């Protein structure tokens, strides 16, 4: 944790000028934080952000010239002490997880109140990971799904796992039967068990789940 008597330095990367300026005005009104840089496009932010080394960056995702996620990927190593908070209108899983993977420590939806945004800046500065409620729920749901998938796969026998692997390679039932020296009926029986355990209805769904789990 950093010293509480220091002002939190903030940079804003946001191409919507009114929102950028409104954010700056509210932040600068606080006694414990100050905006030290504003950027209205991605390229300028990419070139100059590291010169300022702010404590916190409020980062828009969909800038007109690039994704804010790409800026974080390129600058995170150069700015190890800077915390990035995504501030965006995007709520889809891909954007959320790509942002977190890139190194963002917070994810806020633009409709949030200024109080929530200010609290989030203080939180991330003090080691937290602030998120809008809807985003936190999506993240938790994603991990719950992952845990369930792992449990489902752990229920597969060694033989069933082998058969799913062969199905994913494009082998037909007859080819699988020949390869592992069992009858086609036995292959079908194993496949039925695989569908039941993975909660899928067909081969394509089983293969997709298998490939997703492997990755």
Image (cartoon, helix red, strand yellow):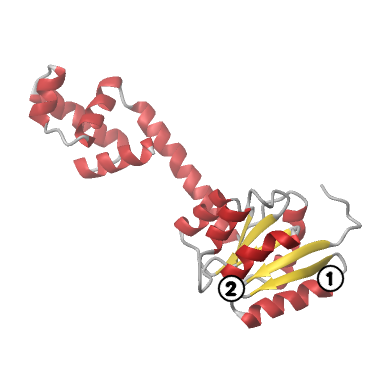
Query: Are there few (<14), some (14-19), or many (20+) residues within 10 Å of tag 1?
Result: few
Instruction: Determine whether the residue tagged by mark 1 lies in a helix, strand or loop.
Output: loop
Along the viewing direction, whichever of 75 and 17 lies nearer the viewer: 75
In the picture provided, is 141 more to the left or to the right than 182? right
In the picture provided, is 194 more to the left or to the right than 128? left
- Which residue corresponds to the image point at 60% horizontal and 50% vertical from the top-left? 103
Instruction: Determine whether the residue tagged by mark 2 lies in a helix, strand or loop.
Output: loop
Counting from the top left corner in percent of width and height, residue 138 is at 51, 54
- Which residue corresponds to the image point at 11% horizontal and 23% vertical from the top-left? 177
Along the viewing direction, whichever of 78 and 176 lies nearer the viewer: 78
Question: Across the whole image, how many numbered discs are drawn on residues?
Answer: 2
The residue furthest top is 181
Evaluate if marks 2 and 1 touch, with contact meaning CB atoms under 8 Å apart: no
Is there any visible trace of residue 136 in the rendered image? no
Residue 164: image quadrant is: top left
Query: Are there few (<14), some (14-19), or many (20+) residues within 10 Å of tag 2?
Result: some
The residue furthest bottom is 18
- Which residue corresponds to the image point at 78% horizontal and 69% vertical from the top-left? 36
Closer to the N terminus: mark 2 or mark 1? 1
Q: Which mark is residue 41?
A: 2
Counting from the top left corner in percent of width and height, residue 200 is at 27, 42
Counting from the top left corner in percent of width and height, residue 117 is at 70, 66
Alpha-carbon span between mark 2 and mark 1 = 25 Å
Along the viewing direction, whichever of 5 and 68 lies nearer the viewer: 68
In the picture provided, is 191 more to the left or to the right than 210? left
- In the picture, the quarter occupied by the C terminus is top left
| Residue 190 position (above or below residue 145) | above
Q: Which mark is residue 30?
A: 1
Q: Which mark is residue 3?
A: none
């Amino acid at each position: 944790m950093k010293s509480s008597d220091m002002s939190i330095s903030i940079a804003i990367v946001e191409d919507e000028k009114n929102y950028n300026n409104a954010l700056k005005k509210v932040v600068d009104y606080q006694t414990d934080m100050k905006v030290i840089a504003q950027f209205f496009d991605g390229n300028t932010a990419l070139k100059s952000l590291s010169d300022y080394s702010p404590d916190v960056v409020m980062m828009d995702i969909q800038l007109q010239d690039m994704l804010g996620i790409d800026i974080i990927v390129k600058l995170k190593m150069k700015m190890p002490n800077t915390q990035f908070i995504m501030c965006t209108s995007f709520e889809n899983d891909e954007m959320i997880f790509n942002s977190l993977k890139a190194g963002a420590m917070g994810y806020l939806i633009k409709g949030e109140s200024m109080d929530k945004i200010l609290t989030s800046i203080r939180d991330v500065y003090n080691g937290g990971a602030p998120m809008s409620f809807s985003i936190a729920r999506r993240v938790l749901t994603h991990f719950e799904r992952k845990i369930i998938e792992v449990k489902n796969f752990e229920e597969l026998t060694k033989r069933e796992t082998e058969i799913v692997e062969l199905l994913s390679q494009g082998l037909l039932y007859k080819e699988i039967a020949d390869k592992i020296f069992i009858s086609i009926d036995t292959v079908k029986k194993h496949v039925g068990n695989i569908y039941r355990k993975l909660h899928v209805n067909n081969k394509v769904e089983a293969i997709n789940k298998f490939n997703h789990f492997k990755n």
